[in-house]
C-alpha cells in the first residue's frame, strides 16, 4: 500500500512539473507537445505547409528582405513551435479559393467571406487579427455630394458593406470585379475611371503611400476577424495552432507586429519601395534589358545584385571580387570587366554570366529549381554544384531538385564526400552557399510576386 501511495505522489509531482514546463517561460508550447501524428503523408511530417495569399500588408520585400504581417507571424510560429514552416505564395485569388477548400496545406492564409462554408467545409483558426472595410476615393471627394454611387470591390471581396452612416445612405450600389485586385481598382481611381473602391483597412494603410492622389474614406462595415483556414484532418495540430495564436496575441511581439505593419504611420510601409511599388533599384531599366536579351527573369539578377553588393557600384569584396556584380577577377577578365567599367557594363557582363550558368544547368535540373542552381553556382562556381549533383545521383537521391543537391553540397566539407571519385573540385564548405541561395531565392520569389515582370 505504501508503495502504491508513493506511486500516486510521484505521478502528481511529475504532472505539476510538466504543467509548469508548458506554461512558463514565454507561455509557448515546447517541441515535445507538437503532434507529428498522422496529419500528412509526406516524407517530412514535421514541416508545416502553408499557402499565403499575396496581400499588400502580409508579404513584400523591404530593403532586400521578405517581410509582412502574416509572413512574420508564420516565422514566429515556426520559431515557437520548433517546426519548419514551408510557405508557398499565391497571387491568384481563384486558385487561392480552391486551395482554401482543398485541405492541401496545414494552414491557408486567405481573406474571403467564409460564412457560407462554415462549418461544413472549413476549419477556421482563432482570429489572427481584426479589420473592417473602408472606402477608397480621390482626395477632396465628398461622399455627400456624389451623384454616381457605385462602390467597386476586388476579387473575392464579399464582406457585408453598410452605408447607413452616410447622410445620403440610399442608392449605393456594389459592383464586384472578380478579375481585378485592389491595386487595379486604385489605378482606375487615379485615372478617374471609377469613383469609389472598398478594401480592408489594413490593406488600405499599406497601399496609401503609393497613391498620393487617393485617401481612405469612411468605414463601411463592422469589424470582422482575419482567420487562417486549417486542414480538417489535423485536429491535434489545429488545437496547438489555436492555442499558440491566443498566447501570441497577448505578447509584446504581437503588438509590435501590428504597429509595424497595420499602422498608418508605419515606417516599413512608407519606405518599402521608394517612389515606385514596382522598382527594385535605380538600375531596373538596364537589368530588364540585359535579362531579356539573355532569356532569364530580370528579378533574378536584381536579387543576386542585392545579395552581392546592395547595389553599391564600386564595392571591392573578399578575394578581389569587384563592383555591383561582385564577380571574381578571373570571371571579370573573361567578360571584359575592369575597375574602370561602368555600372551598366558590369550588369551586362553579369547577365551574360548568369545566362552561361543557366545553360549549364537547364537540361540537368528540374525547371522549377533552375534559378536555385544558378544562384548557387554564382556563389560557389558551377564545379562544386556539379559535384553535389553527382554525389546526389550516386547515393540514389533526386539530383534534379535543389533541396536534395543542397544536402550533398553541405556534405562536401567532409572527407568521405570530397574525396569521392565522382567529385572533381574537392573540398568545399557548402553551408554558406546553401544559405546564400535561400536568401537570394526568398528575395527573388518576393520580387516575382510584388514586381512586374
Image (tube, rainbow, N blue to C red):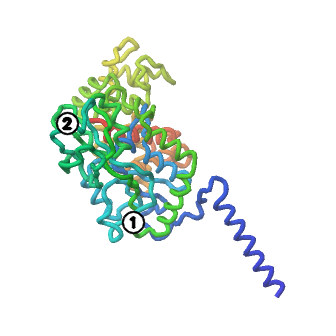
Residue 152, above or below 352 = below
Count up the numbered dots. 2
Point 38% across, 54% down: residue: 224
Quadrant hosting residue 152: top left
Q: Of the numbered discs in the image, which one, if any, rests on residue 188?
A: 2
Secondary element at image label 1 = strand
The foreground one among 432 and 71 is: 71
Point 33% across, 36% down: residue: 207
The foreground one among 206 and 236 is: 206
Q: Residues within 10 Å of mark 2 (few under 14, many from 20)?
A: some
Secondary element at image label 2 = helix
Residue 250, above or below 438 = below
The foreground one among 166 and 212 is: 166
Point 34% across, 53% down: residue: 111
In the picture as drawn, the residue positioned furthest to the front comes out as 167
In the picture as drawn, the residue positioned furthest to the bottom comes out as 1
Q: x%, y% of residue 252? A: 57, 45
Residue 344, above or below 396 = above
Which residue, given by chain and number where applicable, does mark 1 sit on?
123
Residue 92, above or below 442 = below
Q: x%, y% of residue 26? A: 63, 53
Amino acid at each position: 500500500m505504501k508503495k502504491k501511495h508513493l506511486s500516486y505522489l510521484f505521478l502528481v509531482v511529475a504532472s505539476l512539473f510538466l504543467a509548469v514546463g508548458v506554461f512558463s517561460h514565454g507561455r509557448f508550447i515546447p517541441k515535445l507537445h507538437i503532434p507529428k501524428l498522422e496529419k500528412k503523408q509526406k516524407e517530412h511530417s514535421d514541416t508545416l505547409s502553408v499557402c499565403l495569399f499575396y496581400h499588400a500588408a502580409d508579404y513584400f520585400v523591404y530593403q532586400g528582405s521578405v517581410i509582412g504581417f502574416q509572413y512574420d507571424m508564420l516565422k514566429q510560429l515556426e520559431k515557437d513551435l520548433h517546426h519548419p514552416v514551408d510557405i508557398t505564395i499565391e497571387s491568384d485569388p481563384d486558385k487561392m479559393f480552391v486551395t482554401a477548400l482543398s485541405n492541401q496545406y496545414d494552414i491557408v492564409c486567405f481573406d474571403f467571406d467564409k460564412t457560407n462554408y462554415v462549418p461544413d467545409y472549413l476549419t477556421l483558426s482563432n482570429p489572427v487579427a481584426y479589420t473592417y472595410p473602408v472606402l477608397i476615393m480621390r482626395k477632396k471627394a465628398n461622399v455627400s455630394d456624389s451623384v454616381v454611387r457605385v462602390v467597386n470591390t476586388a476579387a473575392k471581396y464579399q464582406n457585408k458593406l453598410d452605408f447607413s452612416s452616410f447622410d445620403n445612405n440610399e442608392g449605393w450600389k456594389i459592383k464586384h470585379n472578380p478579375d481585378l485586385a485592389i491595386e487595379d481598382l486604385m489605378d482606375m481611381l487615379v485615372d478617374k475611371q471609377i469613383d469609389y473602391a472598398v478594401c480592408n483597412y489594413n490593406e488600405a494603410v499599406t497601399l496609401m503611400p503609393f497613391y498620393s492622389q487617393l485617401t481612405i474614406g469612411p468605414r463601411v462595415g463592422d469589424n470582422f476577424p482575419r482567420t487562417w483556414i486549417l486542414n480538417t484532418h489535423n485536429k491535434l495540430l489545429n488545437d496547438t495552432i489555436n492555442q499558440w495564436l491566443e498566447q501570441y496575441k497577448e505578447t509584446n511581439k504581437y503588438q509590435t507586429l501590428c504597429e509595424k505593419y497595420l499602422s498608418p504611420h508605419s515606417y516599413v510601409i512608407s519606405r518599402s519601395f521608394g517612389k515606385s511599388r514596382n522598382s527594385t533599384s535605380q538600375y531596373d531599366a538596364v537589368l530588364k534589358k540585359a535579362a531579356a536579351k539573355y532569356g532569364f527573369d530580370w528579378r533574378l539578377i536584381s536579387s543576386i545584385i542585392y545579395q552581392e553588393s546592395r547595389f553599391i557600384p564600386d564595392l571591392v569584396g573578399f578575394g578581389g571580387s569587384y563592383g555591383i556584380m561582385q564577380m571574381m577577377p578571373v570571371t571579370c577578365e573573361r567578360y571584359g570587366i575592369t575597375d574602370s567599367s561602368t555600372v551598366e557594363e558590369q550588369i551586362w557582363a553579369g547577365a551574360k554570366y548568369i545566362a552561361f550558368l543557366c545553360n549549364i544547368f537547364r537540361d540537368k535540373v528540374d525547371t522549377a529549381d533552375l534559378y536555385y542552381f544558378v544562384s548557387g553556382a554564382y556563389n560557389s562556381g558551377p564545379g562544386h554544384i556539379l559535384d553535389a549533383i553527382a554525389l546526389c545521383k550516386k547515393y540514389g537521391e533526386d539530383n534534379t531538385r535543389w533541396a536534395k543537391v543542397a544536402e550533398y553540397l553541405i556534405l562536401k566539407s567532409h572527407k568521405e564526400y570530397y574525396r569521392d571519385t565522382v567529385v572533381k573540385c574537392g573540398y568545399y564548405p557548402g553551408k554558406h552557399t546553401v544559405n546564400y541561395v535561400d536568401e537570394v531565392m526568398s528575395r527573388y520569389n518576393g520580387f516575382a510576386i510584388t514586381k512586374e515582370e
